[in-house]
Amino acid sequence: MKTGFAIVVVALAAMAGTQSARAAEIKVLTTGAFKQVVVALVPEFEKATGHKVIVDNGTVGQLTQRVNGGETFDVLVLSPGGIADYIKSGKIAAGSNALLAKVGVGVMVKEGAAKPDISSVDAFKQALLKAKSVGYIDPASGGSSGIYVAGLLDKLGIANEIKPKAKLQKGGHVSDLVKAGEAEIGIHQISEIVGQGGVTLVGPLPAEIQNYTTYAVGISATAKDAEIAKAFIKVLTGPSAAAVLQKTGMEAAR
């Protein structure tokens, strides 16, 4: 018996004319922070439709370079501004875009370690100043959280104090630095902390300095199987995605 999710996917695929004897393959490029949502929804989609989804990821900066360099894809998950720019340049099909989710920035420590106080902006500053090392995404890699953190440290007036003990992750997970003991405190998008073994989410940044990253999706103007890509986006924006977003520390985009 098919699950409610599978029935919806089959219906979407049938409406889009994608149910055929030929199993197709679509390529999805996604920012690293949204990858786990995509990956979580792929198995049921593949089972219900018979089509295959290839998922590849990178930072916003890395994906932008790859797309600008001519890499082919069917579905792209990026920032709303990035998707809008690609619609203007003709790389993303007009009208295929949609908002997916948003996620804030959080603080983590190694599993079992004492949680620092980050309940206020001043407490957060003191926690960073007291830490022996602070990990975050290397801004030069184009990761949105790393760019924000670098600017935040300047704004808080502690960039010079943190710089000598900063541990920069060039893409991937800051949690790797924390698990390995290279960073006493890690700062990353909450979705990149929740579910990662070996680390504990201390909490989100204080509201006054919180920053949300919003994700959007669009279909390549040259997609080989645009209708299948369209059906997959229906899943990414549908009710089944809501539970996955909550589990991964994300919120619906509004």
Image (cartoon, rainbow, N blue to C red):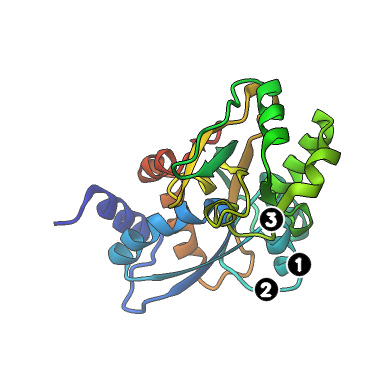
Residue 158 picture location, percent across and down: 81, 34
Find the residue positioned furthest to the left: 1
Of the residues under marks 2 and 3, which one precedes in the sequence? 3
Q: Which residue is mark 1?
A: 68
When the figure is inspected, residue 194 is found, relative to residue 182, above or below; the finding is: above
Residue 176 versus residue 46 in the image, above or below: above
Residue 127, x across and y down, in percent? 66, 31
Q: Residue at x 36, y 79 (%)?
A: 22
Q: How far is the residue under mark 1 from the one under mark 3?
A: 12 Å
Q: Quadrant of residue 73?
A: bottom right
Residue type at tag 2: Glu
- N-terminal label among 1 and 3: 3
Q: Amino acid at mark 1?
A: Asn
Image vertical order of residue 108 relative to residue 196, above or below: above
**In the structure shown, which secondary structural element does the residue marked by tag 3 occupy?**
helix
> Marks 2 and 1: in contact by CB < 8 Å?
no
Measured in 3D between alpha carbons, the distance from the residue under mark 1 to the one under mark 2, in whole angstroms, is 7 Å
Image position of 195 (left or right of 133): left
Residue 91 in sight here: no
- Residue found at x 66% / y 29%: 210
Q: Which residue is mark 3?
A: 60
**Crowd around label 1: few <14 · some 14–19 · many ≥20 (10 Å):** few
Residue depicted at x 36% and y 55%: 12
* Distance (Cα) linking label 2 and label 3: 14 Å
Q: Amino acid at mark 3?
A: Val
Foreground tag (2 vs 3): 3
Residue at the disc numbered 2: 71
